[in-house]
Amino acid sequence: MKPTHLPSGIDPSAARKCIEHPLGKINDDRSTPVRRDLVERTCWYGKPSGCTNGYCWKSCGNGPWCWTARSGGFGDWYTCSKDSDCKTAYACGQVAGDGKCDSCGCSC
């Protein structure tokens, strides 16, 4: 992540250093992480937000979903211990500059 390319209002010291989400993509049941090079991200049609293996995610409509992150999506990933710790108001993970994050944005 290039903190010098953050949108105005985002504190560079709050930006995460690693672009990709630690869990990458997950199985259809949203409970088991899988290696990103083995499967594509699956769509999700269940509850609007939740907690999987200690990280928050949210649904972005009919199928797409994202991992959520602090500081407008550029900061540390939201962590959790239960579904109710996660909110749909949390921002989807974002990347500053020319970076690409296959596992964080709203898609499936």
Image (cartoon, grey):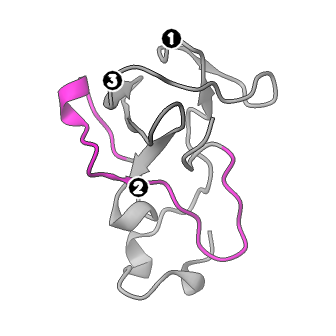
Disc on res. 74: none
Q: Secondary structure at mark 3?
A: loop
- The residue at the far left in this view is 84
Give the answer, above or below, for where 15 lies relative to 18. Answer: below
Where does label 3 land, which residue?
Answer: 47
Q: How far apart are the two marked residues, 1 and 3, measured between alpha carbons?
A: 12 Å
Marks 2 and 3 sit apart, C-alpha to C-alpha, by 23 Å
Q: Residue at x 44, y 80 (%)?
A: 12
- Disc 2 marks which residue? 76
At label 1, the amino acid type is: Asp
The answer to whether residue 81 is left or right of residue 57 is left
Q: Residue at x 81, y 29 (%)?
A: 37
Label located before the other in sequence (1 or 3)? 1
Q: Residue furthest right?
A: 37
Q: Report the magenta residues as a range.
A: 78-102
Three-letter amino acid code at the position of disc 3: Lys
**Residue occupying image coordinates x 48% and y 83%:** 7
Total number of numbered labels? 3
Q: Quadrant of residue 49?
A: top left
Q: Which comes before the other along the chain, label 1 or label 2? A: 1
Return the residue at label 1.
29
